[in-house]
Amino acid sequence: MSALQMTSRQEKLAALKEVASKLPQANLLLLKHLLSLLQDISRNEATSKMTAHNLAICMGPNLLSPPKEHTLPLDRLVQVTQKVTQLVEFLIDHHGELFEEQEAGLAGASGEESPARRAEETAEVPPVVPES
C-alpha cells in the first residue's frame, strides 16, 4: 500500500516490483495471469462494460483485505477499500510494465505464443450430443 504514496509512476512500479519479487513463484504466476486477464477485459470495455476501475472495485477486496476487517469501523474500512481499489486499478493498468522482464519468458524468447497456449487453442472439443 505504501507504493501508492509514491509520487511518480516509475517509483510506484519500482516499489511494486520489489513486493512482487518477494511473492512465492506460484502466487506471482497466478497474479501475472490474473492481471493479464483483467487488462484484456478492460481493453474490451465496449463489449465487457468493465473498466479497470470497475474491475478493481470488484476484484480488489478479494485480492487484498485487511486482517480482522469485520472489527474495523466503517469509515476506516471504506478508506482501506478505496486504497485497495486504487492499487488494483494501477496493477491492471500497468501490469505489462510491472512484469515486463518476466513476461518475455512466458511468451518465449522469440515473442511467439507458448506451446501450452497453442495446444489449448487447437485442442479438439468433443461434440455435444443432444439428449432425446
Image (cartoon, rainbow, N blue to C red):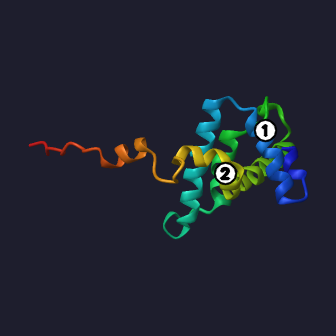
Q: Secondary structure at mark 2?
A: helix
Residue 27 in the image: x percent, y percent? Answer: 63, 33
Q: Is residue 50 above or below residue 38?
A: below
Which mark, by number, is residue 100? 2
The kind of secondary structure element at disc 1 is helix
Q: 126 or 96, which lies in front?
A: 96
Which residue is rendered at x = 57% and y = 64% of the image?
Answer: 43
The answer to whether residue 80 is visible is no
Which image quadrant: the N terminus?
top right
Specify which label sits upstream in the sequence, 2 or 1: 1
Residue 85 image offset from top left, x and y in percent: 74, 51
Asked whether the viewer can see residue 107, the reply is yes
Q: Position of residue 127 (x, y in %)?
A: 18, 45
| Count of labels in the image | 2
Who's the residue at 59% across and 57% down the image?
Answer: 39
Report which residue position mark 1 lands on: 19
Q: On the image, which quarter does residue 23 sit in?
A: top right
